[in-house]
Amino acid sequence: TTVQISNISVPEAGQLPDFSATLSGDYYEFYEEEGGYIINGITWYNVTDDTNIDEDTPFEENKVYKVTAVIVPKGPQMGHPWMPQPQN
C-alpha cells in the first residue's frame, strides 16, 4: 500500500504553519485530535526551542522545525490496540 502526503508549505519566517496537507491513499486518513497540536493530521515542532507550535504561532528566523503527518487506517481497521483511540 502506498501513502503520499503533499501540498504542505516549507517554513518561512513570519508565516504561520501549514496544516492543509493532502493525503493520497485508499486505506488511510489523517488522525484528528481535538484541542491539541495535531490539526488535519499535521503537527509542527520547534526543534530549536523544544516546543510544539500551534496554528497561531508564526515561524521565526534561525529556528529548526519538524513537521509530522499522523495517519491511521480507515474503516474497520480502527480500534486495534496499537491505534490511538479518540477521546470522548
Image (tube, rainbow, N blue to C red):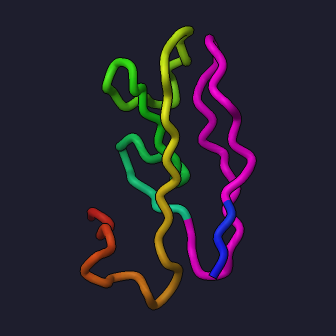
Residue visible at 39% across and 53% down in the picture: 33
Q: Work out whether 10 lies above or below 13.
A: below
Name the image quarter holding the N terminus: bottom right
Task: State the count of labels.
Answer: 0
| 27 to 47, vertically: above or below | below
Q: Quadrant of the C terminus?
A: bottom left
Pick out the residue farthest to the bottom. 76
Tell me which residue sits at (31%, 84%) in the image: 80
Identify the residue shown where x is 72% and y is 52%. 6
- In the rendered view, does 49 fall on the left or right side of 81? right
In the image, residue 52 sits, relative to residue 26, either above or below, namely: above
Residue 65 in magenta stretch:
no
Front-most of 49 and 38?
A: 49
Residue 27 on the magenta span? yes
Tell me which residue sits at (45%, 58%) in the image: 32
Q: Nearer the viewer, residue 65 or 30?
A: 65
Measured from the top left, where is residue 38 in percent x and y?
44, 47
- Residue 44 appears at what percent x and percent y? 48, 36
The extreme right residue here reads 7
Residue 34 place in picture, x, y as percent: 38, 51
Secondary structure character of the magenta stretch overall: loop
Within the image, what quadrant is residue 76 found in? bottom left
Residue stretch rendered in magenta on the structure: 5-29
Residue 31, image x and y in percent? 47, 61
